[in-house]
Structure formats: structure tokens, C-alpha cells
Amino acid sequence: MPGKKILMLTGDFTEEYEIFVFQQAMEAVGHTVHIVCPDKKAGDILRTSLHDFEGDQTYTEKLGHNVTINKTFSEAESQLDQYHAVYCAGGRGPEYIRTDKRVQAMVRHFHEQKKPIFTICHGVQILIAVDGVVRGKKVGALGACEPEVTLAGGTYIDLSPTEAYVDGTMVSAKGWTALAAFMRECLKVLGTEIHHS
């Protein structure tokens, strides 16, 4: 089976691990991941953040590594039919790219075409910005997103930090500590089988 093409939606200060770990794992098994950000071109730099829970009431935020965008946003926008799935990485990026009408149109395409949608942490904020995407779905995300999921007509699933949840072709998780389970479920939805000999 040929590899699939996955579109990763990001913005500045998207969660570092949710970009690098997802991209590298998917590419290790033969898939292609295009990292895009509104108004950035292939070769541009994206700054990332790293969130952690260190005993405070909420997460801390530190500057992560820079990521090189590998697909021009406008090109991806005009080639959506070539992508098999969309991935909404979390962190800070989703809070502002979700207001971009072009990003909303991209998400609407995957929803209407019934293609797989993957979301982790704050990534669900991108989905919530498009009416109907989470309605009737059970979705995991960072706990701070629960009210938004509920108001958008979804059911928030309070997953453990290492679990992922699948509802049809939507895969979700609470945050980067769940990346192993999250990617395992994403691969199943993509039809990717890994056999050990």
C-alpha cells in the first residue's frame, strides 16, 4: 500500500513534540507529512513551544526548537484533494490560526469529504471553529478545552495522559504524553499495518 499524505495545521508556538514526534513517526512508516502555517512558505521558520505540568495550577510554557515549514500554505490550500487526512497539532498555535477563514475552509473540506481528522491537546480549537465538525462526536483534548467541545455539540472525553480516543475516523488525545497511543490509532485509521517478525 502506498503511503498517505497528511496535512499538519500549525501556527507559531504550536507544541514542539506534537509536530516533531508525529511527523517523524509517520514518515518512518512511509507517510508524507506536510507542515503548513498561514502565510508561510516552504523553508520559512516556525517557532514552537513546550508545555509541561510542573506543580502549578496550569501548564508552564517554554520556547521549543524551530521547525522548518516544508510546504507553502497557499499550495496546500489549492491541493486539498491530494491529502488523505488532516492533523491539528496543539499548543498555542490553534488559538489564533482557528480564526483564519482559509484554515476553517481546509478543515471543512476534510469534514465534508469524511476524511480522517486527527487532533491533540488544543488542536480541537481549530475544529471547534468550524460548525458541525465536533457535533455529535466524542473528543479528547486538554481539559481546558472541555467547555468549548461541549458548546460545539461534542462530548468531551476525559482521557488519561497516555490514552487516545477514536470516534469513527476522528482520533483525539489530551496532549503530547499520549503521542504513542495517538499515533497508533491514527495509523489504524489510515489503514497502516505494522507487522513484527
Image (cartoon, rainbow, N blue to C red):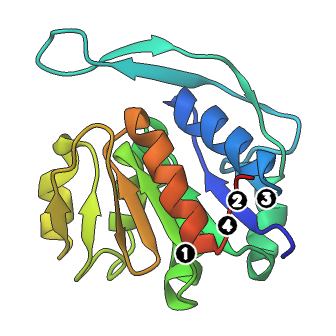
Question: In the displayed structure, would residue 109 be above or below residue 101?
Answer: below
Q: Callout 2: helix, strand or loop?
A: loop
Circle nearer the viewer, 3 or 2: 2
Residue positioned most to the front = 197
Q: Sequence order check: which comes first, mark 2 or mark 1?
A: 1
53 left or right, relative to 94: left
Which dot, 2 or 4, sits closer to the camera?
A: 2
Looking at the image, residue 154 sits to the left or right of residue 197; the answer is: left
Q: Is residue 151 visible?
A: yes
Residue positioned 42% across, 58% down in the render = 126
Which one is in front, 188 or 24? 188
State how many labels appear.
Answer: 4
Residue 155 at x, y = what percent?
A: 15, 69
For disc 3, the marked residue is 31
Q: Please indicate whether residue 176 sits to the left or right of residue 161 in the image.
A: right
Question: Badge 3, how many Cα within 10 Å: few under 14, some, many 20+?
Answer: some
Q: Write down the residue under mark 1.
A: 116
Q: Nearer the viewer, mark 3 or mark 1?
A: 3
Instruction: Name the residue tied to disc 2.
Output: 195
Spatial distance from mark 3 to mark 1, Cα to Cα? Answer: 14 Å
Amino acid found under the numbered disc labelled 3: His
Residue 193's tag is: 4
**Amino acid, disc 4:** Glu
Give the image quarter of residue 53: top left
Element marked by disc 3: loop
